[in-house]
Image (cartoon, rainbow, N blue to C red):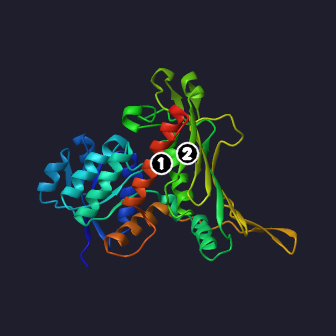
């Protein structure tokens, strides 16, 4: 099978530090043929640095050129995920898009529908699916060790982690704050344990007390006058089978840990903690905590891109599909609607 011809749209840090190095490690399967950025100087600088043949500041020009990509990595800002993904699909390319899928549910659904119509793979870069701990958790679920999972506590919390750079506090570009940037990662993992279904009810609250106060945190200083998003979000999701998820996510929160990324899973036979991976059960009436040794660190970005390429080759993988992305984006939208109206 010939190598995929990959073009990267978006010349920012995530392309330079994450995607390009991962793709270069898959050189037997892909060839990076182009980088496209609205800033042509940034595109040319990345092309020179990584020996990429073509640099563009116009994506349509790129599709019409000799670069001739058939696989796109969309590393643009959140508000540009939809137009660049739709354009790539119209040009008959497979697409791996950064998270979140889009700004709203309608965009995510249209992207999913077009991918299906074109017969192309559209997937999203939720790389935490590839951590060793989550893979082991899924294995324990699939082999019946947990029984029926009925409640999940899903946390992605920063104590003082409002980004002091970029556009993370700009609502028109990002679509939201902590939920859009951090919460979607842990929500994706929780949904993956519940067959990725839509909830039948959502109750949520969002807050911006710390963001609006301004200050300096672990990721620099931010301007309270330009803080337009939530710094914390809490949501309770109830599903048709009576399972539930308690989602907590924050850029900034007065809590103990600087960072807390975890799942606590409650099943009818046993419970589990994702980090450090632990099973909670009982043996003949005695409490039993089964502690696992620290699992080997893996390059989850590389694994996620490799899984995406597998999907493009027609193989079954655990990549976040276009359909799952549309479900997740609808849930995110309903969380925001609930927080605005206290009903969903």
Task: Say which element carries label 2.
Answer: strand
Q: Name the N-terminal-most of marks 1 and 2.
A: 2
* Spot occupied by residue 259 in the image (x, y as percentages of width and height): 63, 45
Circles 1 and 2: CB distance less than 8 Å? yes
Can see residue 294? yes
Q: Which residue is mark 1?
A: 331
Considering the numbered disc 1 on the image, is that residue within a helix, a strand or a loop?
A: helix
Q: Is residue 342 left or right of residue 123?
A: right
Label 1, label 2: how far apart the Cα atoms are? 8 Å
The disc label shown at residue 194, or none: none
Residue at the (61%, 65%) spot, across then down: 133
- Mark 1 is surrounded, within 10 Å at the Cα level, by few (under 14), some (14 to 19) or many (20 or more) other residues, namely many
Q: Is residue 274 visible?
A: no
Residue under the point 36% across and 69% down: 26
Q: Which residue is mark 2?
A: 202
Residue 99 to residue 67: above or below: above
In the figure, residue 143 lies in which quadrant?
bottom right
**Residue at the location (12% across, 56% down)?**
65
Q: Residue furthest bottom?
A: 1
């Amino acid at each position: 099978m010939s190598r995929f011809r990959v073009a990267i749209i978006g010349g920012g840090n995530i392309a330079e530090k994450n995607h390009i190095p991962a793709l270069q490690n898959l050189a037997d399967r892909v060839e990076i043929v182009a980088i496209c950025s609205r800033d042509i100087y940034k595109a040319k600088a990345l092309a020179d640095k990584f020996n990429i043949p073509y640099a563009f500041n116009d994506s349509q020009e790129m599709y019409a050129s000799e670069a001739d990509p058939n696989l796109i990595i969309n590393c643009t800002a959140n508000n540009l995920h939809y137009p660049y993904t739709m354009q790539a699909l119209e040009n008959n390319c497979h697409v791996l898009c950064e998270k979140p899928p889009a700004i709203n549910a309608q965009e995510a659904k249209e992207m999913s529908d077009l991918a299906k119509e074109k017969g192309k793979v559209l997937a999203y870069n939720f790389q935490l699916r590839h951590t060793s701990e989550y893979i082991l958790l899924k294995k324990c679920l699939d082999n019946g060790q947990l029984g029926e999972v009925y409640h999940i506590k899903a946390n992605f919390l920063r104590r003082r982690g409002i980004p002091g750079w970029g556009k993370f506090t700009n609502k028109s570009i990002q679509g939201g704050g902590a939920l859009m940037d951090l919460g979607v990662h842990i929500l994706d993992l929780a949904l993956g344990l519940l067959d990725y279904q839509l909830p039948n009810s959502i109750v949520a609250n969002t807050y911006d007390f710390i963001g609006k106060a301004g200050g300096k945190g672990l990721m620099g200083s931010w301007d309270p006058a330009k803080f337009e998003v939530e710094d914390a979000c809490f949501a309770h999701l109830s599903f048709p089978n009576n399972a539930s998820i308690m989602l907590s996510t924050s850029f900034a929160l007065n809590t103990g840990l600087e960072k807390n990324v975890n799942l606590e899973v409650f099943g009818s036979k046993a419970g589990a903690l994702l980090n450090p991976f632990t099973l909670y059960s009982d043996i003949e009436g005695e409490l039993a905590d089964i502690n696992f040794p620290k699992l080997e660190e893996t390059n989850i970005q590389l694994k996620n891109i490799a899984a995406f390429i597998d999907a493009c080759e027609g193989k079954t993988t655990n990549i976040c599909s276009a359909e799952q992305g549309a479900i997740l984006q609808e849930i995110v939208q309903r969380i925001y609607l609930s927080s605005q109206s206290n009903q969903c």
